[in-house]
Image: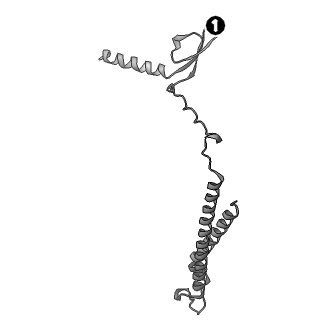
Amino acid sequence: MKLRLLPAFMLLSAAVEADTLYKCTDEAGQVLYTNQKNAAKNCTVLSRDQPISTFAPPPKPQRATNAEFPRVNSDQQKARDNDRRAILEQELATEQKQADDAKRTLADQEARVEPNERNVGGGINGAKVQERLKPYRDSVQLHERNIESLRKEISNLR
């Protein structure tokens, strides 16, 4: 039984030794980093119980230069800009129509009073009305922000 444990202890001690990093200086004064203490004299422990890795970070990818980018002649660029303008203007018209629809829907909802929004005395419960109208107001605000963004984008075109 003792003979079977001996190889296990030898492997364990070798593994511990391999996980220790030493900084050693030889007689010529050269510094050597190693995981074997007997490789040189004047050794100090730098780290223990950390696996030693030979991993090197991958090289940084080279960035493309302006000369490597494809060139577009001015006629092609003008056509692309015109297409972009037409698309943005079409989106703006659609968004304005949706905003008008949302405003009409909000106005219709503001004119209505639901039965559950009336108080016992016959008055109107303003909190319930505001809660019901909130999604309609949010929709109008969303369309107005979209219109503003599209107009800004169109104004930035050349």
Looking at the rendered image, the quarter that the C terminus falls into is: bottom right
Secondary element at tag 1: loop
Q: Residue at x 63, y 64 (%)?
A: 85
Q: Residue at x 61, y 55 (%)?
A: 76
Q: Residue at x 53, y 14 (%)?
A: 37
What amino acid is found at the position of numbered circle 1 in the picture? Ala
Q: Residue at x 59, y 69 (%)?
A: 90
Residue 102, x across and y down, in percent: 58, 78
* Front residue of 124 and 81: 81
Residue 127, x across and y down, in percent: 60, 80
Looking at the rendered image, the quarter that the N terminus falls into is: top left
Which residue corresponds to mark 1? 28
- Residue 45 vertical position relative to residue 107 in the rendered view, above or below: above
Q: Residue furthest top?
A: 27
Q: Residue furthest bottom?
A: 122
Residue 57, x across and y down, in percent: 55, 31
Residue 11, x across and y down, in percent: 39, 19
* Front residue of 101 and 44: 101
* Front residue of 137 and 82: 82
